[in-house]
Amino acid sequence: MSSHPWYILGAGSIGCLWAANIHQTTGNSPVMIVRNRERYVDRKVDKKPVLTLTHLDKTESQHPVSVITADEITTPIHQLIVCTKAGDTLTAMNSIRPALAEHCNVLLLQNGMGSQETVAEAFPAQNIWIGSTTDGAWISKPLHVHHAGQGLTEIGCFNHQPATVFLRQFQGFHLKMSASKDIGNVLWQKLAVNCAINGLTALFDCQNGALLEYDKKPLMDELINEFTHISKAQGRTTPESLHEKVYKVCRLTAANHSSTCMDARLRRKTELAFMNGYLIRIAEKEGLKLPAHQKLMDKLSQKGVRW
Ligand code: KPL
């Protein structure tokens, strides 16, 4: 692993999961860049903040980290993992732009599609990799993350360097990772699942498994059919059995609330603009309409869900 410290932009569930794992693997404390330091650091207590990771087997480990805001960065950043929400990523990256070393290694770990390209285009000199993760994690309070489901993080090259260069630095890392030769396709496959599940669970304020109920499943089926249609128009491959794949995710995560359902419940801005919204935008470019997706977005908007 390079001697430069790792910086992590965003202290949500995935940011904290990676921070804890980096500390566990390297013994070095990563630096977490946040918007509001007071949420994470007790100013009255003069000691390094400690991140708690509850592992899959429910054991806990403690990981000292630094928590700073963008304007407190003093040294150039050489290695960065970006774990902000898709819609916040460009603004967050711009806030640390002056601190980025030339050819900084950057891993983008956002949900959905669209934000990665925007960031990569705005930072052409940096070495950018894109990751897509199926790890399940949630935060019970600031700096306490629970690893809830063992997943896989697939990493692909966006511009200058192959994924293997990035992965070499993470030997012995506890999270499962693999290099992908076609990260665009990996993102697309995940988008298919997110477009079918996330918006609907926010609309009905329900767990993922509830989408298999007789009154909701036809709506999900319509979304999947539209996804298959646009996939063909784009010359992309989707699994033969996209319906089966989505049902399987609903069954495997039956008791979970999707990230979008939770965002909507907590009145936070969702990532729907990078899921169903992204699909609608690319369909428009093809001169196609996606009525089921549009209707879903309209209903969510009437419900006050933001994206
Ligand atoms: O990725 C997800 C999310 O919540 O964003 C799914 C697959 C729907 C699991 O909850």
Image (cartoon, rainbow, N blue to C red):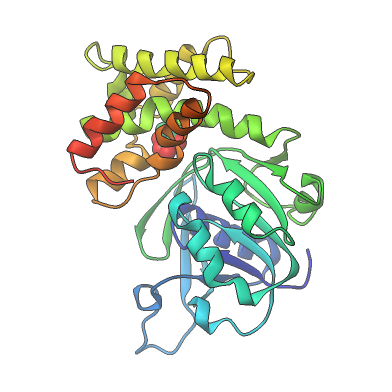
In the image, what residue occupies the spot 58% across and 81% down?
Answer: 73
Ligand 1, seen in the image, is in the quarter at top left
**Image quadrant in which you'd find residue 289:** top left
In the image, 300: left or right of 157? left
Observer able to see residue 187: yes
Q: Position of residue 130 (x, y in %)?
A: 65, 46
Observer able to see residue 64: no
| Of the pair 230 and 88, the residue shown nearer to us | 230
Compared to residue 164, the image places residue 210 above or below, namely above
| Of the pair 19 and 284, the residue shown nearer to us | 284
Q: For the N terminus, which image quadrant?
A: bottom right
In the image, what residue occupies the spot 40% across and 77% down?
Answer: 37
Q: Position of residue 257 (x, y in %)?
A: 32, 37
Compared to residue 70, the image places residue 123 above or below, namely above
Q: Position of residue 21 (x, y in %)?
A: 60, 58
In the image, what residue occupies the spot 51% across and 82% down?
Answer: 71
So how many labels did they put on this image? 0
In the image, 213: left or right of 175? left
In the image, what residue occupies the spot 32% across and 24% down?
Answer: 209
Q: Position of residue 274 (x, y in %)?
A: 45, 41
**Image quadrant in which you'd find residue 144:** bottom left
**Image quadrant in which you'd find residue 145:** bottom left
Q: Going by the picture, which residue comes out furthest to the front? A: 287
Q: Going by the picture, which residue comes out furthest to the left? A: 303
